[in-house]
Image (spheres, rainbow, N blue to C red):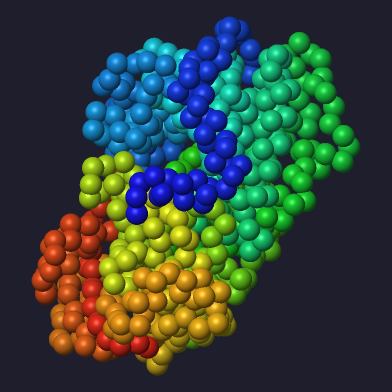
Amino acid sequence: MPPLLLKLRALRELGSWSAARYLAYQLGKKTGWYRWRMSPPVSGKWRLIGPPQGWPTSSGMPHPLEGAPAPAGVDEVLRGRVTLWGATAPLDFAVPIPLEHWTRHDTAQIAGRDVKFYWEPARFGWAVTLAQAYALHGEARLPEAFARLLNTFLDKNPAYTGPHWANGQEAALRLIHLTAAFWLFPEAAAGDVLALHAARLPPTLIYARAQNNNHLLSEAAALYTAGVALPAHPHAARWRRLGWRWFHHGLQTQIAPDGTYIQQSTNYHRLMLQLALWVQLIARLDAGVTSPQGGATPPLPLAARLDGARAFPAASRTRLAAAARWLLALCDPVTGRVPNLGPNDGAYILPFTDCPFDDYRPVLQAAARAFLGASAFEAGAWDEMSRWFGIENRESKIEYPIFDSRFSIPAISHPRLDSRVFLRAARFTGRPGHADQLHVDIWWRGLNVARDPGTYLYNADAPWDNALQSAFHHNTVTIDGRDQMTRAGRFLYVDRAQATVIESNRTRLTAEHDGYRALGLVHRRTVGTADEGWLVVDEIREQEAGSREQVRVRRTHFVRRTHSVRRTFCVRLHWLLPDWPWELAGMTLRLQSPHGWIALNISAPAGTIRIIRGGEYLSGSGEPAPTLGWYSPNYGVKEPALSLIVDSTAALPLTLHSHWHFPN
């Protein structure tokens, strides 16, 4: 597709208002408007109020976490390293390029390296870990270490200069983490630092509104935080008003009625819930704050007070309850893991837990108690986050696992095996992050047997420039070497493939998508229980002659001619599997899992089978495939996996069967 046409279609995909806001933001950068408008505010010693009632304010004061162990990672931070996405990296705030105003910096790569490796340490999530340890155990070395690292950041990255100020969300998350740290390091509290960050956000909020995703929620949450926590600041009322308005606008427009989050990502879904829990905590402070001078802040209407907190609007509470149920349905209660669905850039804030990064139970336990009024899991290490967010334990417990046929990734459990499957069937309302329609995840005894590849890197040289987002890397079918949608940028697909759930009950799921409507074809997938496992059936057939899409497609001579001459298609089935010992006999693959041998039998007309591990062929041959046979559990991390590929060229209708067998 010609580049100009692709850009025009991308703008159409964004929608007129979002496109206009995005173009206005870019115009502001190019013309120097932001350089003129956004100068560092006059420094002032704005006193920080808080924390909310119930938070520890110094060691030695009784609080709900008395006697808890010190958070993991403290010594690592003091040695100059920080844990990111399950891996460690240097805690270094310097960037190896000359610093200019933030509008003049690229936000993809710095000196050939993904910018996220610089941004993540500067979000200051590690500061919360230090502050927790100080509040719990009063180690004298921690306040000094925190102050030293904060001053180092400010010295190496002057206000609004360099890549660390180039993205409003990065400044917003830094503000949130610094607020939490200042509450626990009261002697280090610096309201002027928070004000510096808050003043960065309003001028470019138009970009966050154009995105209408986690960027808007993060920046709105930060503005609300600054407005409440710095009541004497001359812009506090405006920050508070802007933050509250756009945060709830974001919740109500980004969360679908069934709980699906607009970014179609389990990782971003969790981030959204974390931000909601934080804003709820700040709302408790908002209900009765007083300024440092003793004058009361403008009183809230009686209707805005609820149990000592500023009440969330009913529409927001309803959407958050649905969102909590949606993510709970995907969570394995034994490990806390979820399918690696959609973009996974490792976003994780306010680490009030020692549970590992891929354990979703801390956030889900807190979200269930806050928004559903019941606990999701039995008591455990994952309860610590609830206490830091000021959320009480709930005796009642949610029925688990959750089943709801409306979900965009419905799940079913096998009646005789400890196994569940998830079938991806999305109706996109925002920008799709991955082309993964009808992807299937299979879990058995806590093992993710058929898995989503993840993300690896957003900003890298080809072929690793967000390569794992395509349908070729997911557990689904592709036709004639085409992706399900047209890639129009690193984070944008056009020609959205929309899925429709045909059947959904506790033993069988059927859905289809229209991503191949340009070929006049439909892909339908059925997943159902079998005697010893699962049966996945893929059907490729022509669209019904009377459908609107078929009529539209056949208007062009090219497609009419293609359909009249060509009756066979090349269909490729892909399964991404763990890197376990394997045996291949004909069309049957056997995998040696920690719990015994698993068998996958494929039935496909005129089918050929290949196995790729880490970009290299172990069985079969073909074109180089450097990005196949990889699994990315966390951002910036990739591990070898097995890509099982079955190619079948036959006339339509074409049907493929994948029969999974598990030992009892």
Quarter placement of the N terminus: bottom left
Q: Is residue 130 shown above or below 212?
A: above
Residue drawn where x is 73% and y is 29% of the image: 241
Q: Is residue 621 left or right of residue 595?
A: left
Q: Is residue 32 shown above or below 469?
A: above
Quarter placement of the C terminus: bottom left
Q: Toward the viewer: 581 or 220?
A: 220
Q: Toward the viewer: 41 or 93?
A: 41
Spot occupied by residue 630 in the image (x, y as percentages of width and height): 24, 59
Q: Is residue 383 left or right of residue 527?
A: right
Spot occupied by residue 86 in the image (x, y as percentages of width and height): 33, 46
Residue drawn where x is 59% and y is 32% of the image: 206
Q: Is residue 257 shown above or below 243?
A: below
> Toward which corner of the image does residue 520 lie, by quadrant?
bottom left
Residue 603 visible, this angle? yes
Residue 228 visible, this angle? no
Total numbered labels placed on residues in the image: 0
Q: Residue furthest right?
A: 302
Residue drawn where x is 46% and y is 51% of the image: 9
Q: Is residue 600 shown above or below 1?
A: below
Spot occupied by residue 259 in the image (x, y as percentages of width and height): 61, 60
Residue drawn where x is 52% and y is 34% of the image: 23
Spot occupied by residue 336 in the image (x, y as percentages of width and height): 46, 60
Q: Toward the viewer: 612 or 420?
A: 612
Q: Residue furthest bottom?
A: 531
